[in-house]
Image: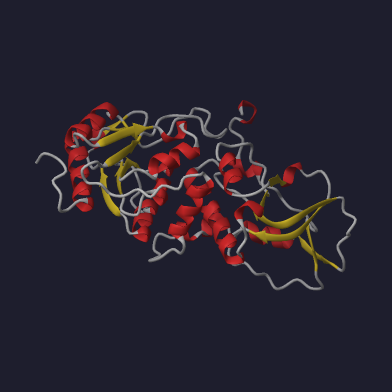
């Protein structure tokens, strides 16, 4: 990775020449895509041929979904790609293990590559194909920024529970967590500095909790006898992350891509989302996920500049940790005495 330090993302996208894609057709349809999208560039590279050469040495059978990835190591952004491919899978009724994925980008290897392999069939990289390749059937994936998950104003997003079941099943997780107010499971996600991709060699990330130990202690004391866990999720494999979250009643964390796991909480679960003072208020991706899945939601945004510290750390007062946890517990278990009043 060090050889790619500070490489611009724009250098990792292909500029397709005419005839990069060739189809058996007489005439191409009119320009089908509105707005500025990579699909427009792909379409400009398509040419019609009377008969594709059947002697092409490289031939890939089955259905291949072509994907151009953006922010390829960001869990939220990649989740939109996963969901888009899932929608195509549902629409065309394709078994996931038979779906070929073709990356039409030049991104280096990333931590989420393993998840692509776990969810679908074979993975191909266009940049590593030295010879002409004939695909029996190809579908261009929806651009990630046009994914329904990106539109927080939607009242409904289809197949989310089915997407959850599919994602867990492909990772061999089939649990059916039942709410037990006498033994709640709370998972607190820590955001800590780490190097995720070559464009951030310093590894410094935003929206971290300064007083992690104090925060954890206050929640643990409030919910004595319940199961409280705190962890940096990106240190675990995706399978372990999913196993943990699928058994979690209450997920707690600063706004960030890790909260994409809201999609995999049990159907009764809830999310407590925390924001620093400098965060833009219009980003409501995870709140929207809770609405679509009919989960519970509580949030807090720091309004006191004295709680903001260097290195993008925010001090969360213990009174806030306790009050927000109480709010969520009362949503999940309104008829139960879960903690000492």
Residue extending farthest right: 55
Residue extending farthest left: 341
Position of 109 compared to 271: left or right? right
Position of 74 compared to 313: left or right? right
Position of 101 compared to 236: left or right? right
Answer with the quarter of the image where residue 254 lies.
top left
**Residue at the spot x=27%, y=28% of the render?**
211
Q: Position of residue 57 (x, y in %)?
A: 87, 50
Question: In this view of the protein, which residue sits in the foreground, 19 or 299?
Answer: 299
**Residue at the spot x=37%, y=32% of the render?**
231
Position of 28 compared to 9: left or right? right
Can you say whether 245 is above or below 284 in the image? above
Answer with the quarter of the image where residue 152 lies.
bottom left
**Residue at the spot x=34%, y=44% of the render?**
279
Can you say whether 84 is above or below 12 in the image? below
Indicate the quadrant containing the C terminus: top left, top right, bottom left or bottom right.
top left
Q: Position of residue 264 (x, y in %)?
A: 41, 49
- Look at the image and name its color scheme: secondary structure
Question: In this view of the protein, which residue sits in the foreground, 40 or 189?
Answer: 189
Q: Position of residue 237 (x, y in %)?
A: 50, 35
Question: In this view of the protein, which residue sits in the foreground, 119 or 109?
Answer: 119
Question: In this view of the protein, which residue sits in the foreground, 322 or 20?
Answer: 322
**Residue at the spot x=28%, y=54% of the render?**
296
């Amino acid at each position: 990775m060090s050889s790619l330090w500070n490489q611009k993302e724009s250098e990792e996208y292909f500029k397709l020449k005419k005839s990069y894609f060739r189809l058996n057709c007489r005439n191409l349809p009119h320009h089908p895509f509105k707005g500025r999208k990579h699909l427009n560039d792909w379409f400009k590279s398509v040419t019609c041929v009377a008969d594709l050469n059947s002697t092409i040495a490289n031939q890939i059978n089955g259905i291949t979904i072509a994907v151009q990835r953006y922010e390829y190591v960001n869990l939220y952004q990649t989740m939109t790609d996963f969901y888009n491919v899932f929608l195509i899978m549902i629409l065309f009724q394709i078994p996931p293990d038979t779906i070929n994925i073709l990356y039409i980008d030049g991104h280096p290897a990333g931590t989420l590559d393993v998840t692509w392999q776990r969810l679908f069939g074979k993975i191909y990289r266009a940049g590593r194909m030295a010879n002409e390749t004939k695909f029996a059937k190809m579908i261009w994936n929806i651009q990630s920024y046009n994914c329904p998950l990106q539109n927080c104003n939607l009242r409904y997003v289809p197949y989310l529970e089915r997407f959850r079941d599919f994602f867990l099943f492909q990772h061999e997780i089939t649990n059916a967590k039942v709410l037990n107010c006498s033994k709640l499971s709370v998972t607190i996600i820590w955001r800590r500095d780490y190097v995720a991709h070559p464009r951030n060699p310093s590894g410094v990330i935003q929206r971290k909790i300064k007083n992690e130990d104090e925060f954890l202690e206050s929640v643990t004391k409030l919910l004595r006898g319940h199961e409280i866990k705190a962890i940096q999720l990106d240190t675990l494999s995706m399978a372990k992350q999913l196993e943990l979250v699928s058994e979690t009643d209450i997920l707690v964390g600063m706004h960030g891509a890790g909260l994409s796991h809201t999609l995999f909480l049990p159907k009764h679960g809830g999310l407590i989302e925390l924001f620093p003072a400098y965060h833009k208020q219009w980003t409501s991706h995870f709140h929207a996920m809770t609405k679509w899945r009919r989960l519970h939601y509580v949030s807090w945004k720091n309004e006191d500049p004295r709680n903001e510290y260097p290195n993008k750390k925010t001090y969360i007062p213990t009174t806030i940790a306790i009050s927000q946890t109480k709010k969520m517990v009362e949503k999940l278990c309104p008829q139960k005495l879960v903690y000492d009043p």
